[in-house]
Image (cartoon, rainbow, N blue to C red):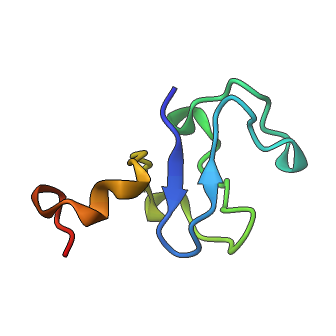
Amino acid sequence: MKKWVCTCCDYLYNPEQGDTNHEVEPGTPFNELPDEWLCPECSAKKNKFKVYVERAMWDDAIPEYGGY
């Protein structure tokens, strides 16, 4: 399952963990979160999240990846 990151505060929503503090069970995909769900860190709405893309730490140092 894809992880999603808040563009306001960098909170990472991991569907494998859910958001048990806000009654979202582990295994809940982002698109199945309730419409009224807000970022637990900054209260941003769901439309402020984007798919999280993991990158290797050294990606920024390679010109082909936009570094230096």
Image quadrant for the C terminus? bottom left
Q: How many marks?
A: 0
Residue 61 x %, y % = 27, 65
Q: Is residue 36 above or below residue 15?
A: below
Residue 37 placement (x, y as % from top left): 67, 53
Most distant residue in the left direction: 64
Q: Nearer the viewer, residue 38 or 7?
A: 7
Spot occupied by residue 21 in the image (x, y as percentages of width and height) = 89, 49
Left or right? Give the position of 45 relative to 25: left
| Up-down relation of residue 34 to residue 42 (above or below) | above
- Seen at 29% across and 64% down, the residue is 60
* Residue 20: % across, % down: 86, 41
Residue 6 placement, left or right of 19: left
From what the image shows, is residue 46 above or below residue 34? below
Looking at the image, residue 37 lies above or below residue 26: below
Residue at the image position 21 percent from the left and 69 percent from the top: 67
**40 lies left or right of 55:** right
Front-most of 13 and 65? 65
Camera-side residue of 43 and 10: 10
Q: Residue at x 74, y 37 (%)?
A: 18
Asked whether 21 or 66 is in front, the reply is 66
Which residue lies at the image location 43% right of the left edge and 45% below the top edge?
54
Query: Where on the picture, by quarter, is residue 45?
Result: bottom right
The furthest residue to the right = 21
Using residue 52 as the reference point, say whether residue 42 is left or right of it. Answer: right
